Amino acid sequence: MAQITALGKYIENLNLAYNNFNNTQIPSKFDKLNNLGYLNLSNAGFVGQIPIEIAHLTRLVTLDLSTLYFPGTPSLQLENPNLNVLLRNLSELVELHLDGVNISAHGTEWCQAISSSLLNLRVLSLSACNISGPFDSSLLKLHSLSVIRIENNNLSTQVPEFFSNFSNLTSLRLSSSGLYGTFPEKIFQVPTLQTIDLSGNSQLQGSLPEFPKNASLQSLVLNGANFSGQLLPNSIGNLKMLSKIDVPSCNFTGSIPRSMENLTQLIYVDLSMNKFNGSVPFFSMAKNLTLINLSSNLLTGQINSSHLENLTNLVNLDLRFNLLDGTIPPSLFSLSLLQKLQLSNNQFSGQLPVFGGISLLDTLDLSRNKLEGPIPMSIFNLKGLKILSLSSNNFSGSFPLNSLQQLKNLSSLDLSYNSLSIDYNTANSSDSSFPQITTLKLASGKLSRFPDFLRNQSKLNTLDLSQNQISGEIPNWIWRLSTLFQLNLSCNSLETLEGPLLNVTSSSLSVLDLHSNQLQGQIPLFSQSSIYLDYSRNNFNSSIRTDIGDFLYFAVFFSLSSNKFHGIIPESICNASNLQVLDVSNNSLNGLIPRCLTAMSGTLAVLNLRRNNLSGTVPDKFPEHCSLKTLDLNGNQIGGQFPKSLANCTMLEVLNLGNNQIADTFPCLLKKISTLRVLVLRSNKFYGRFGCPKPHGNWSMLQIVDIALNNFSGEIRGKCLRTWKAMMGDDDDAMSELNHLRFGVLKFTGVYYQDAITVTNKGLEMEFVKILTVFTSIDFSGNDFNGSIPEEVGQLKSLYVLNLSSNALTGSIPTSLSNLRQLESLDLSNNKLGGTIPAEFANLTFLSFLNLSNNQLVGKIPSTAQLSTFSAASFTGNKRLCGIQLNISCNNPSESPDAAQKAPNKESGIGFDWQSIYTGVGFGVGAGVIVILLILWEEGRNWLEDSIDRILLAILPMMGFTYKTRDEWNEEEEEDFEEDSTYIMEDCDIDENESEDKGFQGTYCVFCSKLDMSRKRAIHDPSCTCHLSPRISSSSSSSYSFSP
């Protein structure tokens, strides 16, 4: 540097960029270089304060002090001197590059420092300078400004419209700068503008203008800006010079303009993650196009060879996550430069074509389509393949795993969830000749053994062999795979683990899924680096290790559910300070709930201890910043009072304390938890009034309430129901999204814990292994409620199940219940309800279970098509009720049976009406004579029956009934005798309610349901065989899903 300063008067240009001066300061002797016009010290390893001597270089035209700044590392600073002092005398500057220099200046300060001194400035680059907004209008003095690059700052401001007044503007880069408001359309229309980058500003809104013809724009980058609901204008076809359009995640809608097909200079097209619909445009005129990314849209139609015409330079084609169908054109695999082809998550069908051997293809992703047939063996001709994903299709036949030896570059293979039979022959393979694979997923591939070649895979990171037919023991070598991070062996028939397991604690394994096997004994030890551990649905039959928590330091998911564990829950479990999901349900654990377990709910989101033998009380130690979303203690022997500190869990969604011995009043302390969706207090010893004094809180998301079989008393206060908004929506506005209650365990991995619940529906207990967010249910049965049914119940229009049975409710059935158009199950039995059954119940067209028995209902059961489908069991026990369902005729349809009792007596005293007595005796004697004659006189009897048939056959059809004559009944009796089994089968088909109830017994399987999107509801298929989801391996008892 001393030699440079010695020659100072001769040096005009100095470039020391991209050297390594090892974090030293810029020398202060730069003022000796008084003839310097160009100074570039960028990325040369200088740090610290920029010396004041730089400000003395008055002849500078270009100054570049930019550096790549990383948080936490030393940087260049402008504090003393500040920006104003540095630039005061540099009036000749044309280009200023200070990227990565910590300027720390407010908008007015840095704008005026530049505009007051650098009137000739053309290039302004201040990226990552820690400057803030707003933009000051003094920048308008810079009439020559051509390039503005102010990226990666926290400007927190709007983009001023005066930027459109920079008549020489060619490049505007404002990415990731915290911009908000509406971007001015006029800036897009600056005639000289060639490059604009607004990416990374999620709060920035706007729309694209009508572009003029012969515009200069070459690069349009809006990645992540919010152009919600806007269309790409058809005038985009006027941008004849456009080579790059990068607008993913901008919320664009509508179809992709066909005018884009005329853009011949296109090289890079990324329209992904928007809401574009319509068909895929033709880009055949853009012969230099290298990348097309239209993924994650709503595109439909087919792709054919015409789409690929002239795209000889295409390297990357990504059409994932659309609605494209048809077959995949064979010409796609003939593009000589194509390296990445991603067509997953569409509806492509048909068979795969034969592959050539000259392709450069390194990524082929055709997963989650409807492709079928065998996988062609010519796929092994794609020697450059690194990633091959064909999962979740309908491929059949066999796949020779040994042939992977031909694909030397293969690093990822996914063949899961097809109808393939994956074959592996030890005799025809050499372990050393297999490629070094990092990801191998062969779920549901009919494998019967562990492929031996895996023992020598030194780079294997993810291994999924779930849902196969592997039995016996898990080999010891699998724990010695030093790079193995995720292992999924769930849903097999594995029984033991090959010993010894001494090295398991030093394994790098972080995700281990062994659920749904037949493993027994003790669970294997694991390292402290474990994140996800699932041992559920096995036969483990030991006690839980007392030091278990010492091995769960990093664990976020830990499940031992549905095993045979016994003993206590060790207190060391509380050492798992990062745990988000703890599930030990469906075991034989006893003792007390550790007091520290509820105290750790500052991180814990799901605590499931259901169906054990736990006793004592719920520890009242929930912390102030409780993060619990699910607390399930159902089916234990827990007593005491309701824990008051549970009110701290303000994010609670599911609370299930059913089937315990808790004795307390209604938990009004929860009334401020607005996220609550499921509240189950069933079969405890709760008592007192239902509901809370004012204010009533906000349970707007509540969808399932079960307080049955307790000792609640008093009236059901309707005002308590008025905040249950989730039950009030109708078909149009009830629930906009159909989903399940679930908790994301590991972000960005698709790993979820899914809540389960048992609901009494249609007289049966059903276990829902997934809770639809549109399913709603109220069960107040088995209490001591009195008074009338509140009219407010009729406002819960999206209710599916209502059970108020076995109480002491009085009054009439409110007609407002007819507003519950989605109601499928209604049980009001065993009360003291009176009056008539509302005729408006005809509106309940989806009602498939009705029980009004054992009340005091009167009058005729309404003759409606809906109510006529229910049997006598729905109405029995109402002494004054009549109708065809009960085979009790009503003397006067317009008059109730008790009307005669209400008629006043003509005489107050006791007396005899002899005229009536004589009349009755006369009729009785006459009727007796006629009956005797008909018994003895067959011809007269036949004449009378035929006459009655003719009369009823003429009258009853006029009243909407059908009538069969005596001869027709005789014919059917003969057919019944001959075809009895046929009619039994038809009876099962006709009695849909009964067959549906039988189909629902036991565990309810959501994979055997179809979604009726018009009603946003699930319809169960009782004849369906329950299978696991093809995308995830799930455990119904522990109710979670894992997909590595």
Image (spheres, rainbow, N blue to C red):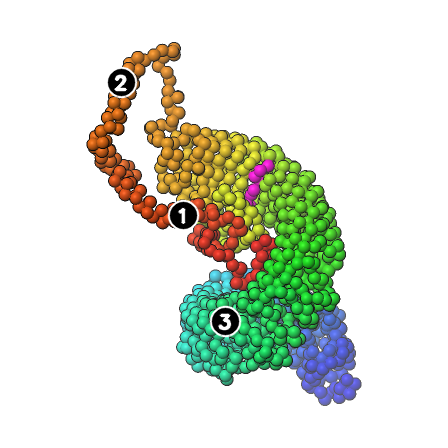
Image quadrant holding the C terminus, namely bottom right
Are the residues at dot 3 and dot 1 in contact (C-beta closer than 8 Å)? no
In the picture, the disc for residue 988 is 1
Pick whichever, 910 or 809, lies toward us.
910
Pick whichever, 455 or 945, lies toward us.
945
Q: Dot 3: what SS?
A: loop
Image quadrant holding the N terminus, namely bottom right
**Magenta residues?**
700-710
In the rendered image, which quarter is residue 15 located in? bottom right
Q: Position of residue 695 (x, y in %)?
A: 60, 38
Q: CA distance from mark 3 to mark 1?
A: 44 Å
Q: Position of residue 399 (x, y in %)?
A: 52, 74
Q: Residue at x 57, y 58 (%)?
A: 1034
Q: Which residue is mark 3?
A: 366
Q: Residues within 10 Å of mark 2 (few under 14, many from 20)?
A: few
Above or below, comparing residue 217 to residue 297 in the picture:
below
Q: Earlier in the sequence, mark 3 or mark 1?
A: 3
Q: CA distance from mark 2 to mark 3?
A: 91 Å
Q: Amino acid at mark 3?
A: Leu
